[in-house]
Image (spheres, rainbow, N blue to C red):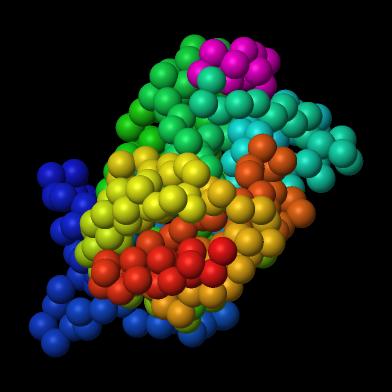
């Protein structure tokens, strides 16, 4: 709706994707459990659409400012984007970005499916040089897990002059911080699993775009590949979005305070905090084994590989074989949750005391 543009994201998160108000009508979208539909309507078959999907897509679309499709996972959403590219198409991405996408594209590169160019994403000139002749530029800011800043506005503007398509993974920053479609990006992708859903109980992804032709092509990929979400998971994610801004801001307040405290701890050698959101990365003065001991010793913070939940989570990222070699063996990616900040600090200091 045109009026959505006037509403703040905190309002959109609560109001978007609701049923049309009617007397005694439902306030919340129901869970639509149908694989089969009577002929003659716009859906046709359960793999092509679902009432609950539409509600979540409307909510995410209102937040990101573009038409949205939901997928079975963030990886499924990303795969749909790459599926649009011809064989051998050049793709540029960060050499220290999210390892799931990097591993997927490395496999495509080795098989000849795509020509993948890894680049230091914080170096805008290097990114645009690598983007010459490319079909797609894949960006994220801050980077995951190092939380480095990438100049999205400058790079997207430069990529558009080169005629290169741009996709942005906005999972960490979220539309509360930036809306890449407004910078000129063609696509914004989310792991809906993370901040949008926010309760560590669903796996979903989404793609948003303001290009109607691209939206249709991506929708066709979803139909034909079968990477569709389940209505239960979608309903949970929609429910999670209602409190997304509250959770994000609470985590952000905790993260800002904890980043300051970590920077002053003698066993912490480096802290990266982008100044917004609930993500911190920090490096320790010990080796990998010592870092593992720290992450395993916490009582409140969960040692796990996810992020964006209401609960605090951390892990040593180089424990994954597919993580970038540029990431330090002692780097901990810390997804700060909404617990009491002093309880979290006590847990951190006790854990650091193990080394």
Q: Is residue 293 left or right of residue 274?
A: right
Residue at point 61%, 53% (across, down): 286
340 relative to 279, above or below: below
In the image, 15: left or right of 227? left
Q: Is residue 134 magenta?
A: yes
The outermost residue toward the right is 111
Q: Which residue is more in the foreground, 177 or 289? A: 289
Q: Quadrant of residue 162?
A: top right
- Viewer-proximal residue among 46 and 84: 84
Magenta residues (range):
124-135
| Residue found at x 66% / y 53% | 287
Q: Position of residue 355 (x, y in %)?
A: 56, 64
Give the prevailing secondary structure in the magenta stretch. helix
Query: Does residue 140 lie above or below 73 as drawn?
Result: above
Image location of residue 16, percent across then percent down: 24, 62
**Residue in the picture at 43% in, 60% down:** 335
């Amino acid at each position: 709706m045109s009026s959505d543009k006037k509403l703040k994201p905190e309002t959109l998160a609560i109001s978007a994707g609701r049923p049309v108000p009617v007397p005694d009508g439902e306030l919340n979208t129901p869970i639509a459990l149908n694989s089969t539909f009577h002929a003659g309507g716009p859906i046709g078959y359960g793999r092509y659409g679902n009432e609950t999907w539409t509600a979540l897509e409307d909510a995410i679309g209102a937040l990101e400012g573009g038409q949205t499709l939901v997928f079975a996972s963030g990886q499924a959403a990303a795969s749909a984007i790459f599926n649009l590219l011809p064989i051998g198409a050049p793709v540029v991405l960060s050499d220290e970005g999210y390892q799931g996408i990097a591993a997927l594209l490395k496999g495509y590169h080795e098989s000849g499916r795509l020509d993948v160019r890894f680049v230091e994403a914080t170096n805008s000139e290097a990114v645009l040089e690598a983007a010459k002749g490319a079909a797609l530029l894949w960006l994220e800011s801050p980077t995951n897990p190092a939380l480095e800043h990438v100049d999205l506005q400058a790079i997207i503007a430069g990529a558009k002059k080169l005629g290169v398509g741009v996709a942005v993974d906005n999972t960490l920053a979220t539309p509360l911080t930036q809306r890449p479609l407004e910078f000129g990006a063609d696509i914004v992708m989310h792991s809906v699993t993370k901040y949008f859903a926010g309760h560590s109980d669903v796996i979903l992804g989404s793609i948003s775009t303001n290009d109607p032709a691209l939206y249709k092509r991506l929708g066709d990929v979803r139909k034909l590949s079968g990477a569709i979400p389940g209505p239960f998971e979608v309903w949970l994610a929609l429910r999670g979005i209602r409190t997304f801004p509250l959770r994000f801001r609470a985590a952000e307040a905790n993260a800002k305070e904890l980043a300051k405290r970590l920077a002053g701890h003698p066993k912490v050698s480096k802290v990266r905090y982008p100044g917004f959101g609930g993500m911190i990365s920090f490096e320790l003065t010990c080796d990998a084994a010592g870092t593992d001991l720290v992450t395993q010793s916490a009582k409140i913070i969960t040692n796990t590989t996810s992020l964006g939940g209401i609960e605090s989570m951390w892990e040593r990222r180089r424990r994954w074989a597919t993580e970038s070699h540029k990431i330090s063996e002692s780097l901990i990616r810390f997804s700060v949750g909404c617990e009491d900040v002093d309880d979290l600090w006590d847990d951190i200091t006790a854990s650091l005391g193990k080394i």
